[in-house]
Image (cartoon, rainbow, N blue to C red):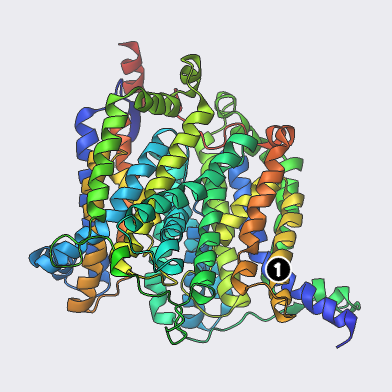
Amino acid sequence: MRIELEKRAEHSQLMTVVSPLIAIGLTLVCGSILFVSMGYNPIDALYAYFIEPLTTSWSIEELLVKAGPLVLIAVGLSVCFLSNSWNIGAEGQFTMGALAGSIIPVLFYDFTSPLALPLMVLMGILGGMAWASIPAFLKVRFGTNEILTSLMLVYIAQYILDFLVRGPWRDPEGFNFPESRIFDAAHVLPKIGEGRLHIGMIFAILAVLVVWWMLSRTLKGFEIKVMGETPRAGRFAGFSSNGVVWFGFLVSGGLAGLAGMAEVSGSIEQLTPVISPGYGFTAIIVAFLGRLNPIGILFAGLLLGLSYIGGESAQVSLGLTDKVTRVFQGMLLFFVLACDTLILYRFKIASSVKNMKEAGNV
Amino acid sequence: MSDLSMIEAVLLTIITASTPLLLAAIGELVVERSGVLNLGVEGMMIVGAVMGFAATQATGSPYIGIVAAMISGVAMSLLFGFLTLNLMANQVATGLALTILGLGLSGMVGEAFIGQPGISLKPIAIPVLSGIPFIGPLLFNQDVLVYASYGLVIAVYFVLFRSRTGLIIRAVGDNHGSAHSLGYSVIQVRYLAVMFGGACSGLAGAYLSLIYTPQWVEGMTAGRGWIALALVVFASWRPARVLIGAYLFGAVSILQFHAQAAGIGLPTQLMSALPYLATIIVLIMISRNKTLAKVNTPACLGKPFVPDR
């Protein structure tokens, strides 16, 4: 007896919804085994990870602060991934957006007009777009592999940030700490309520709505999906494959840049050598868990945001290393990809050669 | 120090910097020749690094560490193989997942080892040959992994291009449909190739944590897995060119240290970014030559194989 995969005639609608849930379930099961092997009670650990953060308004707010950039980046990546371009350098575009968005608060800190914030938002988007346009240009012009170029640019962006905050952009009154000056109140994104939540989350929700509308209701969205699934058919329909590459990279780069600017201006309020706990890479998981669908990505972003907060809470209450968070995130992506098989294929138990022959004769 | 021994010292550091790239790239070359794109090199490498270090600390023998690193690299590659070869998952996404998982796992396992002094693997001098002036100490007084990297390049060349096995691997990579019709098991060949790649990545990781800097530092692969992937493209899937490419990259990454030491006025961060910048430039140069890429790229690279019976 062996198990075989049989291609479904069409995508299973049921499995499209159910498979991410199965993946989450499997991650929790494997996570429990991991906790037991580390000598923790799995119930306590899972509670600390996934329930405890939801019991205080402070941590719910913190969850939204973390989910904001994840959703923004992942929504952009979904456009790119749907068109079958692989921008995996969102972390670099995030950094460059943060840098471009910090030009006003760091270099022109006297410019405190109400125009400053909109300008910073614009510059953040442009910064991310500019960084994303490098792999896009190289792919379109020379056919250079965009996976490798976009990833290499992550390291380069990180070094540029490091250079600036330790060199020319360092706060002259900062006692030689590698930090920029603290942003003026006019350069800080407005807060929602009393806590740390800022309007970056609103940017994320707007991005979800706009991209959802674009993908499902416009010709551009249709073009992206056709070029992603059957580029040959797309070219016969008169769609430009280069145009789709450019579009995907500019949208994902722009949104990652916006996320970077919002993180620096809304959350950290200055530039430091480390501005992201790997949002650009975690957003890849968010995009896949959300099935490259903006609405799904919103929920996936909240879950992955929870994994960051849960890691911190489990560290405080159980003394569990926060490194477990990354393991959780990696396992989740693995299970999501594995369960995607259920959408395209069905499992069939082929008990013997004879049965297979009979099946063939029917 | 005389000029000659200065040059010798620089060349020695270049060999040290190049070997992990060479080990990982030669493994990935075989994987890609069989038609599979495993982007998880970075993840397998870092798990190899931490497991190699852990096993060495536990047993006191770096050789057991090397074996442990290979085994963990293979284990990671089997995860990748199961998803992409059995479940037909997207190879690009699964490779990324392997990297994310590997970085996470290594951080968790390695936390206990941060700051511990490691046990370094000692070089083995080859009698007579290591006595040759200049060349001897460079090529014949190295550790076992450097010798292994030379051996692997030669072995991969002969197996891929001078043996029946290699013909089958390349057939599977270039046209899996035909290879299947001829009766070769595409999935089996690809599994073996993927496992070989995992073992090589594990070795590369062990080199980092046992020889390059004999200690555990989180994220110590620092993108070397990705550079190894770029090297395979740079080499247009030829073993000898992987050797040249790896040493070129090693040279670039070492020269920036020497330039910094010599007091060249560029900011250190920009010098440190050089290897990544060089990778991009090299990728551009190689992709401009369309025919070269077309002739050597395995035609089925990254395409899942669904046997239609």
For residue B58, side relative to residue B25 (left or right): left
For the C terminus of chain A, the image quarter is top left
Residue matched to label 1: B146
Please determine whether, in this image, residue A106 is positioned above or below residue B230.
below
Which residue is situated farthest in the top direction here?
A362
Asked whether residue A333 appears in the rendered view, the answer is yes
For residue A261, side relative to residue B216 (left or right): left
Q: Chain of mark 1?
A: B
Exactly how many numbered labels are in the figure? 1
Q: Secondary structure at mark 1?
A: helix
Q: Nearer the viewer, residue A265 or A141?
A: A265
Residue positioned 27% across, 34% down in the render: A212
Please determine whether, in this image, residue B25 is positioned above or below residue A178.
above
Asked whether residue B38 appears in the rendered view, the answer is no
Whole-percent x, y for residue B220 in the image: 52, 70
Whole-percent x, y for residue A37 in the image: 27, 70
Q: Nearer the viewer, residue A173 or A63?
A: A173
Residue type (three-letter) at the residue carrying disc 1: Val
Whole-percent x, y for residue B274 in the image: 65, 63
Whole-percent x, y for residue A209 in the image: 24, 38
Residue positioned 28% across, 68% down in the render: A185
Q: Nearer the viewer, residue B38 or A127?
A: A127
For residue B215, side relative to residue A203 (left or right): right
